[in-house]
Amino acid sequence: MQLLAKLLNKEQINILNLASLAPSGHNSQPWTVRIKEQNSWIIGTTPDRWLPAVDPNNRELLLSIGAFIENLIVASQYYGYEIEYKVIAKKSSKYT
């Protein structure tokens, strides 16, 4: 938390906290957040958070990240921020 306090303001930390309350398939919370700059974040995942036995095509993973992003947008708007985002994906599964 101390590192986040150096990179983000209190509102932005609250936004990430609210976004993290998003539902996720099998409660896996597969999202990752990389802070490039105070107002530039990369939302993603890492293969070690995937569940190939129960979600081989990563359908639940993608829905979970979508829920996280939607929570992020709603929380950001509450604090007066406007979100601009791009979806960039190479493939939906490391198994295909």
Image: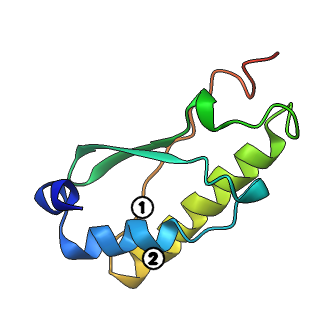
Residue 65 at x, y percent in the picture: 63, 51
- Precedes in sequence: disc 1 or disc 2: 2
Which is more toward the observer, 84 or 92? 92
Residue at image coords 61%, 47%:
30
Number of the label disc, if any, that sits on residue 75: 2
Q: Gap between marks 1 and 2, in whole Å?
A: 10 Å
Quadrant in which the N terminus is drawn: bottom left
Q: Nearer the viewer, mark 1 or mark 2?
A: 2
Residue 56 at x, y percent in the picture: 86, 31
Name the residue carrying label 1: 83
Give the residue at the far top of this rendering.
96
Vertical relation: 14 (above or below) 92: below
Circle 1: element type: loop
Q: Are marks 1 and 2 in contact (CB under 8 Å)?
A: no
At label 1, the amino acid type is Ile
Residue 68 at x, y percent in the picture: 58, 60
Residue 18 at x, y percent in the picture: 47, 74
Vertical relation: 59 (above or below) 84: above
Give the residue at the far bottom of this rendering.
78
Q: Residues within 10 Å of mark 2 (few under 14, many from 20)?
A: many
